[in-house]
Structures are given as structure tokens and as C-alpha cells.
Image (cartoon, rainbow, N blue to C red):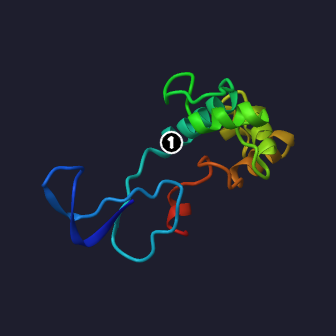
Amino acid sequence: FAKRSRTRCSKRRENATRPYKVVDYHMRRDYGRGSYILWVRDPIDRFRSAYDWQVDVIRAPARQRGCRLGPGCPAPARARKKFRTGHAYDEAGGVHFEELMTHFRDATRLAESIYLSNEDGRIARELMASPMEHLAKGTGWYMYD
């Protein structure tokens, strides 16, 4: 999201001004009233990307010291948390979330399972209703729709 602002703001340390204040609202909905620009990705690409990233975070090695964001370290803070607790997601419901995420071999299998009436279907639907991370947070979540 980019919130429109009536004030001008400078970009970094440059003296250039622009009529819009750009604010990142990634995984946040505390933006209030105003005009916004919403960047939308291909929903299938976004779903696959979200699934792959979250599984990478869960499977990444635990690290006592910080690591740089990149291959092998998709989420430095989660890697440190995993070192301390044994789980990248240790908050309430986090361990269960990890179990749900690693139940499926890939994003395609998760997507294909959503409408099944078996255990895979139940797990897929529970995962898609989970408030953890951004797999289930599409534009409707951001727009309260």
C-alpha cells in the first residue's frame, strides 16, 4: 500500500520531493482512511511464492548469530528464534502451523487438497484460515473484504 499524503516528503537524503508519502503496509492493516495504491501480483504466483518462502523459513537451519537475508537464510529473526526454541514459529499456534505447512510436499498439493473431503482437505482448509504469516492474506485481507 502507498498512502496518499497532503505533505511532501523527501526520498532518502535527496532533496527531491513528491506529492505522495510511500508507506509499506505489508501484513498490517493499521492504515486508516485515505487514498491508496495497491500492488497486486498474479494470485497463483503469489500463493506458490508464499508457500515456498514459509516452508523455507521452517526448514532453514537454526542460527545462534544473525545471518544475512538470502539463500539459506530467508528470515534471519526466525533463524535466531529457531536456535533458541527449536521452532521458527514458536508463538501461540506456531508449532502447529509448522506441522500444517510441512504436511504438503508442495504448493500444488496444498492447492489441490483444499476441496478434498479427506484429512488432507481438512488440513489444507485449516492452513488457509491460519492467521500466521501471509499465505492466507490476499487483497481481501488487506481491504477487509
* Tag 1 secondary structure: helix
Q: Residue at x 53, y 36 (%)?
A: 49
Q: Residue at 57%, 22% (x, y): give it.
A: 72
- Judge whether residue 42 can be spotted in this image: yes
Q: On the image, which quarter does residue 111 sit in?
A: top right
Give the vertical position of 129 relative to 36 (above or below): above
Compared with 129, 50 (above or below) is above
Q: Quadrant of the C terminus?
A: bottom right
Q: Nearer the viewer, residue 117 or 125?
A: 125
Q: Identify which residue, 124 or 83, lies in the foreground.
A: 83
- Seen in the picture, residue 114 relative to 143 is either above or below; the reply is above
Find residue 78 and report its horizontal and vertical position in percent. Answer: 64, 37
Circle 1 residue = 46
Which residue of the protein is positioned furthest toward the bottom in this rendering?
A: 33
In-image side of 61 versus 92 (left or right): left
Q: Nearer the viewer, residue 21 or 96?
A: 21
Label 1: how many residues lie within 10 Å, few (<14), some (14-19) or many (20+)?
some
Name the image quarter holding the N terminus: bottom left
Look at label 1 and name its amino acid. Answer: Arg
Residue 144 image position (x, y, % from top left): 55, 69
Which residue occupies 56% across, 62% down?
141
Q: Is residue 44 left or right of residue 130?
A: left
Residue 77 lies, in percent from the top left, at 60, 38
**Residue at the right extreme, as displayed:** 119
Question: For the point 42% across and 46% down, which residue is it?
Answer: 41
